[in-house]
Image (cartoon, rainbow, N blue to C red):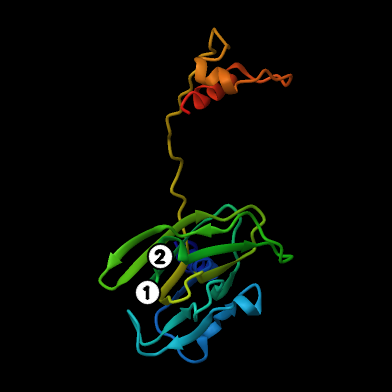
Amino acid sequence: MTRIVVLFPLIAAVLTAADVNAPHFQQSGFTDAANGWTVWSSRPEIAPRTWIETTVSVGEPGSLAVSGNGNLGAFGGWQRTVSGIEPGAWYQLTASYRHTGITSPNWQIQPRLDWHKVNGNRAGEVDYAYKGAQEGEWTRITLTTQAPAAANNVSLQLFLAHAPQGTVWWDNVSFEKIPSPGPRNVTVASVNLPPKDLSPPNKVCASSWKPSSVPFPPMRISSFCLRESRW
């Protein structure tokens, strides 16, 4: 009995240490120090204006602000690197933003995850958060995704793209490892219907249809004629 009692604290300590070491980040409220956030842009001439806004927030005081500053080519914003990523594991990014002067927020406002290997090279593709829910003047975005193979760290990027008169404020940002959502079943169907007659379908198609020495699959030839027949 004594041996079992001694093991329980040990197991609890191991589980606690694993939870602490798992990548987790959450922040609401920003100060002049930016708390580990840095400004990113590929070139100085297209860098947007960035600052800590003390009067706009959705949680604790302060938010990360990005403005096009009158420059149509402006692209970039704030980013923060989280290390200790497990390749193949699932993670979730959430953040809130508020904007003004932006005509197409679905592509001009870009919350995203940029994965990197231990050597600094990019791992996989950039993941963009596209799911959002309106919460008053703010929009809450969520991105659930799987870390690419060989990923070692990830940059949480809160960007603004090509919005010269636009400003976006970011707040209430979190990033954490989550359980795998499991497999998703899909239904896939295909149709195999080679046409019997490969001649042009009508006179309109015949006027622009020319034989080719390059062998095409029957379905491709048929589709070509059908598209030509619309003119």
Numbered label attached to residue 105: 2
In the displayed structure, would residue 41 be above or below residue 210? below
Find residue 100 and report its horizontal and vertical position in percent.
Answer: 36, 75
Report if residue 70 is visible in the image: yes
> Which residue is outermost to the top?
196
Numbered label attached to residue 99: 1
Q: Amino acid at mark 1?
A: His
State which quarter of the image contains the N terminus. bottom left
Instruction: Count neighbours of disc 1 (C-alpha within 10 A) and say few if under 14, some if 14 to 19, many if 20 or more.
Output: some
Indicate the secondary structure of the residue bearing disc 1. Answer: strand
**Relative depth, front residue between 225 and 188:** 225
Asked where in the image residue 194 lies, by quadrant, the reply is top right
Contact, CB < 8 Å: mark 2 with mark 1?
yes
Report if residue 222 is visible in the image: no
Instruction: Count neighbours of disc 2 (C-alpha within 10 A) and say few if under 14, some if 14 to 19, many if 20 or more.
Output: some
Q: Amino acid at mark 2?
A: Pro
Q: Residue at x 57, y 58 (%)?
A: 126
Q: Residue at x 27, y 68 (%)?
A: 135
Indicate the secondary structure of the residue bearing disc 2. Answer: helix
Find residue 90 and report its horizontal and vertical position in percent.
Answer: 50, 55
Find residue 219 and report its horizontal and vertical position in percent.
Answer: 56, 19
* Residue at mark 2 to residue at mark 1: CA–CA distance: 8 Å
* Residue 65 horizontal side relative to residue 121, left or right: left
**Relative depth, front residue between 47 and 54:** 47
> Which residue is outermost to the left?
136
Find residue 97 and report its horizontal and vertical position in percent.
Answer: 38, 72
Q: Residue at x 52, y 90 (%)?
A: 33
**Relative depth, front residue between 131 and 223:** 223
